[in-house]
Image: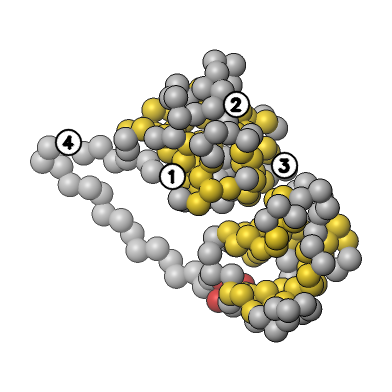
Amino acid sequence: MGKLVVSLDNVVIKEVPITKDRTTLGRRPYNDIVIDNLAVSGEHAVMLAVGADVFIEDLNSTNGTYINGKAVKKQLLVHNDTVEIGKYRIKYVGEEYPDYEKTMVLRPGTLPPPVAAPATIPPPAHAMIPASIKVLNGGAAGREVLLTKAVTTVGKPGVQVASIAKRPTGYVLSHVEGTAHPSVNGNPVGDGVVSLKNGDIIDLAGTQMQFIQG
């Protein structure tokens, strides 16, 4: 499920592997990750592991939880996402990147070993195909949104919100906010993620959208 790299003023303080279903962050000492800063609430946020996926959820904190500079309530984390809580930065490193940020130490007068040229491996077919969602009904019918970001949120804040994350293996949809969950091809989305394929119909807060890839 990956790990969390906690830093302050660009100095890494600790690395915390995600091994539990719930990993709490906050100022109080019983949290899994204790952040001793007045800008941080006693129970600030929680990391939720669902299968191989990790979500972060703000626990109605005073100053909010930010991912890559954007305030979030709940969001699926992707590799290299930076969670900002107060002055602290918490980088999420996915489990498929175990050697992330390893440092090579060289003695004076030595040269680094030669690096062999990597074999040319064609990217997966989906990596070469841009994806988008097209609104099918309502006032915005016909509008098309390109999915160029690592995570794109869609829906109506305060009513129903979902996120579409771009992964090495394709795109996945997850529920973020709202009592009702979105559906894909008429099947409700649970608390995990659903892989999207070309032509899938997403129903979100009464708005129908089609996932288009290729």
Residue drawn at x 17%, y 36% is 107
Locate residue 48, reporting x and y percent: 67, 37
Q: Is residue 76 above or below residue 31?
A: below
Depth check: give the residue in front, 189 or 72. 72
Residue drawn at x 78%, y 70% is 207
Q: Amino acid at mark 4?
A: Arg
Q: Are marks 2 and 3 in contact (CB under 8 Å)?
A: no
Depth check: give the residue in front, 142 or 133. 142
Instruction: Tell me the residue that label 3 is attached to.
Output: 50
- Residue 111 as seen in the image, left or right of residue 53: left
Locate residue 112, reporting x and y percent: 22, 47
- Taking the view exactly as shown, the residue that stands out farthest to the bottom is 142
Disc 4 secondary structure class:
loop
Front disc: 1 or 2: 2
Kindly report the distance in space between the C-alpha atoms of the residues bearing marks 1 and 4: 22 Å
Disc 1 secondary structure class:
loop
Looking at marks 3 and 1 on the same chain, the residue that comes earlier in the sequence is marked by 3
Looking at marks 3 and 4 on the same chain, the residue that comes earlier in the sequence is marked by 3
Kindly report the distance in space between the C-alpha atoms of the residues bearing marks 2 and 3: 21 Å
Front disc: 3 or 4: 3
Q: Is residue 103 visible?
A: yes
Q: Is residue 54 above or below residue 25?
A: below
